[in-house]
Image (spheres, rainbow, N blue to C red):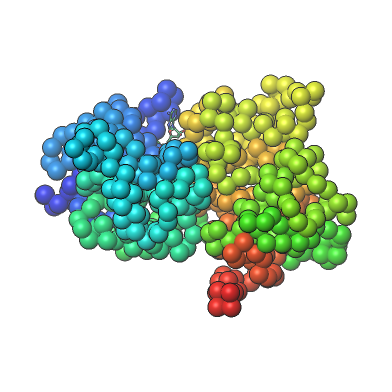
Amino acid sequence: MGDPAGQSLLELRGIDKRFDAVAALSDVRFSLRAGEIHALMGQNGAGKSTLIKVLTGVLDADAGEIRLGGRAIRPASPLDAQKLGISTVYQEVNLCPNLSVAENIFAGRYPRCGAMQGWRIDWTAVHRRSSELLARLGLNIDVAQLLSSCSVAVQQMIAIARALNVEARVLILDEPTSSLDDDEVQKLFAAMRRLRGEGMAIVFVTHFLNQMYAVSDRVTVLRNGRWVGEWACAELGPQALISVMLGREFAVHDQGAAPLPPSVADAPALLEAEGLGQSGRLHPVDLRLRAGEIVGLAGLLGAGRTELARLLFGLEAADRGRLCIDGEVVKFSSPGDAIAHGLGLCPEDRKTDGIVAELTLRENIALALQAQRGVWRFLSRAEQAALADRFVMALGIQTAGIETPIGLLSGGNQQKAMIARWLAVAPRLLILDEPTRGIDVAAKQEIMDELLRLAETGMAVLFISSEMSEVVRVSHRIAVLRDRRKVGELPGGSSEDTIYALIAAEHEHG
Ligand SMILES: Nc1ncnc2c1ncn2[C@@H]1O[C@H](COP(=O)(O)OP(=O)(O)OP(=O)(O)O)[C@@H](O)[C@H]1O
Ligand SMILES: [Mg+2]
């Protein structure tokens, strides 16, 4: 599948990369043209991030060659790659929370000014250029604010702005949209198309098929560390794409949550929030969940979904309203209290709130159950191993073994481990904040099916996802939030359009 001579800006051939027993890449090739958006697709653990790390000098390939503009290159570090014009935004945003937005965009390469040029940083220029870069992505925010005060989504855009802030010829985006809502995805796509028009070569890694089709020109598919093929997107339909990724046929089924049995629908509430809120963060919310019920929380980014989850779980203290569990008023002053009452929360940001990178997969999965048991009742290593083995099987976590440090797993497999951690506790009510972020199509479906099964056994689920189609598919009932306030509830099976209409209606009035 060669390129006509001279068309390729970047060529990778025969790339091999092993990690001990794991062959992450075997004889992989990849070709990229200037002025194209090229999707790199494959299941969790297929080798996408590893290929990108080889290309950007994070990892040294065991074999193979990389040519940029016809010249053999071998980036020895990300900085080296950047100097060659290859810029990257990694799957796990790697910024400094305690620096300002502008500092994050410019860290390590500040413009200098004045008579003292050479050692005085030109802050006016830093701020102006940061604002311009973000505006190019359609984002207008105060660049002097701390990064930590920005949402995960905004942080993602800042990471992209940082990548643009060099003379990049190749821009690599590893799952850049996994934490963005529809609106922001559109803005990012607009920015990508503009950059493509300027001749930038863009590599786009994503698990969202619709997004891939919306913006990409060509697609390369990897499976189990091997190159499967390269196609023009227009020539490979979604079903065909899924089959080449999986190496087998796969049908996406759309059957949603079955209607609640009347016994569940009439049951008393397991959790009931009445006017629960926190000044400045969340207007008072009423919400009720029964055992066996899956309630979806829909809303755009910043609608207050995560804030509500954090209040319910005792990560933030409510300063108004009340919370009842089994009809008794409770006050959670820490997540420990919530866990003791049978709640679990799988958080949105697995990097800062979730995984403990140095611990093994086994330890990470056992963490919440151990916390629930308290220090006096240690889970033995054998108990932890049994637990980990069970969920590696149930969720199809791809790993060399349960003793592997979790940081070495692929992004999607880390995310599965986070879900496993909370399923292991068997909470009465599980709150899942963006649980399928970074998870491939097939695994997503498996996780949704697992949730439906667990609900049938009586677990209540509060399901938060920016992917409206998922919320619709899995929920018995959908609570819609906008601007940090609940604006209504819809029955399960409502269409995505109905939800968007509810959000939009509030826009007009509000
Ligand atoms: N530093 C490492 N040490 C050991 N194994 C690794 C390391 N980095 C990656 N791997 C393994 O290499 C394989 C490919 O991982 P990679 O992160 O490239 O997958 P991916 O396609 O990006 O998946 P995802 O969609 O989940 O992000 C996986 O089996 C992973 O566990
Ligand atoms: Mg990856």
| Relative vertical location of residue 230 with respect to residue 20 in this rendering, above or below | below
Residue 99 or residue 467, whichever sits in front: 99
* Side (left or right) of 111 relative to 337: left
Instruction: Check the image and report above or below for 53 versus 504.
Output: above
Q: Quadrant of residue 277?
A: bottom right
Q: Which of these two is toward me, 393 or 440?
A: 440
Q: Is residue 361 visible?
A: yes
Can I make out residue 221 in this image?
A: no
| Viewer-proximal residue among 399 and 190 | 190
Residue sitting at x 77%, y 44%: 332
Most extreme residue toward the front, as rendered?
115
Q: Is residue 349 above or below residue 392?
A: below
Image point 32% across, 42% down: which residue?
Answer: 106
Q: Residue 25 location, x and y as percent?
A: 35, 34
Q: Is 409 situated left or right of 118 in this image? A: right
Is 194 situated left or right of 400 in this image?
left
At x 67%, y 56%, the residue is 279
Image coordinates of residue 197 in percent, x first then y, are 22, 61
The residue under the point 51% across, 47% down is 149
Q: Quadrant of the C terminus?
A: bottom right
